Image (tube, helix red, strand yellow):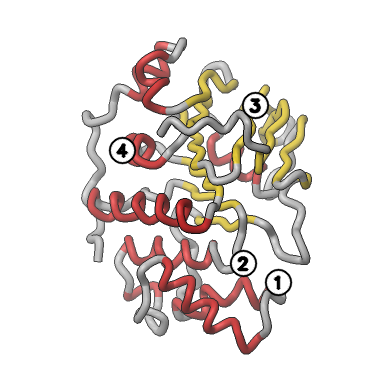
């Protein structure tokens, strides 16, 4: 993936951001422009602040300094009462007492999105986009791990966002499910022109779908690499980044749950 985003107006702009908790910074000096239609990965050591940065990007955590703009609005300011982004949380975070269809309709109801009579059809369309036609009446407990992730992805798409945030989307999935999810993410980007920001430690997914990656260093508490994964694997200035990316093919995903 050699697409250059330098000449495209950024859909997300991160300007000299510091994130942390209780006054203690976890990461400082974060700068990045994320282009429209880009798949952008946030990677790094365990505990380096990947999810903390994502929380700041979706407005769950206030940056200690700097600012984050989504579509030129600070911290994902809602558009017409609805957020301009969707979020896939690591575990899916589906409501277990609600059907798959009701889970996808819930954001529409909460934000008054679309006419009430049209929401069911819209939710069915989102489920079809992720390959879950026919699963509308099922409950999360009856779904495989891969299906739960896809249902949660359909819910993240419920409000037609311009940006998707995915927190460890492949976590807990077997290799086949992970590959299918990677293919789905790529096809959604191609079909919808959506920008995708994902936190991941899965190198196969990183090299498969990401246009660029930002590496957060847990020792210096600063980002130390930004660029296409393949280029950084060959020529990153940081030995740590090259060694991190060289693990590709050495570590395999645990086979936890089936794809169907």
Relative to 130, is 39 above or below? Answer: above
Q: CA distance from mark 4 to mark 3?
A: 25 Å
Q: Verify CB contact (< 8 Å) between mark 4 and mark 1.
A: no
Q: Nearer the viewer, mark 2 or mark 1?
A: 2
Please determine whether, in this image, residue 19 is positioned above or below residue 72.
Answer: above
How dense is the environment of label 2, judged by Cα within 10 Å: few (below 14), some, or many (20 and up)? many
Q: Residue at x 65, y 49 (%)?
A: 58
Q: x and y percent of residue 198 in the render? A: 49, 43
C-alpha gap between disc 3 and disc 2:
29 Å
Of pointers 4 and 1, the one earlier in the residue sequence: 1
Residue 186 visible in the current orientation = yes
Residue for badge 2: 159
Residue 97 visible in the current orientation: no
234 to the left or right of 32: left
Q: Percent position (x, y) of residue 209?
A: 39, 42
| Circle 3 residue | 30
Disc with the residue nearer the chain's start (3 vs 1): 3
Which label's residue is closer to the chain start, 4 or 2? Answer: 2
Residues at badges 4 and 2 in contact (C-beta under 8 Å)? no
On-image quarter of the C terminus? bottom left
Q: Are marks 2 and 1 in contact (CB under 8 Å)?
A: yes
Q: Find disc 1 in the rendering and name its residue.
A: 111
For this view, does 224 lie left or right of residue 31?
Answer: left
Q: Is residue 156 above or below residue 118?
A: above
The reply, left or right, for residue 124 in relation to residue 177 is: right
Task: Check disc 4 and report the residue beneath it.
Answer: 204
Which quadrant would residue 200 be assigned to in this image? top left
Q: In the rendered structure, which disc, 2 or 1, sits on the residue that comes first in sequence?
A: 1
Mark 3 element type: strand
Task: Label 4, secondary structure: give it.
Answer: helix
């Amino acid at each position: 993936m050699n697409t250059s985003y330098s000449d495209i107006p950024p859909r997300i702009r991160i300007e000299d951001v510091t994130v942390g908790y209780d006054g203690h910074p976890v990461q400082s000096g974060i700068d990045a422009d994320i282009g429209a239609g880009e798949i952008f990965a946030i990677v790094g050591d365990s505990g380096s602040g990947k999810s903390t940065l994502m929380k700041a990007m979706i407005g769950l955590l206030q940056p200690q300094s700097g600012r984050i703009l989504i579509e030129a609005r600070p911290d994902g300011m809602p558009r017409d009462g609805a957020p301009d982004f969707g979020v896939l949380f690591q575990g899916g975070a589906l409501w277990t007492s609600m059907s798959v269809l009701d889970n996808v309709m819930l954001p529409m109801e909460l934000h008054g999105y679309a006419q009430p009579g049209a929401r069911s059809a819209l939710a069915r369309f989102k489920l079809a986009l992720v390959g879950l036609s026919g699963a509308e009446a099922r409950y999360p407990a009856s779904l495989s791990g891969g299906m739960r992730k896809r249902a949660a992805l359909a819910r993240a798409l419920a409000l037609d966002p311009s940006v998707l945030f995915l927190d460890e989307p492949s976590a807990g999935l077997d290799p086949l499910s992970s590959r299918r999810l990677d293919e789905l993410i790529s096809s959604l980007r191609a079909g919808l022109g959506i920008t995708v920001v994902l936190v991941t430690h899965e190198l196969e997914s990183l090299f498969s779908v990401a246009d660029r990656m930002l590496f957060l260093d847990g020792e210096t508490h600063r980002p130390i690499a930004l660029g296409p994964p393949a280029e950084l694997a060959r020529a990153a200035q940081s030995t740590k980044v090259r060694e991190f990316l060289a693990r590709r093919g050495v570590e395999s995903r645990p086979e936890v749950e089936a794809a169907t």
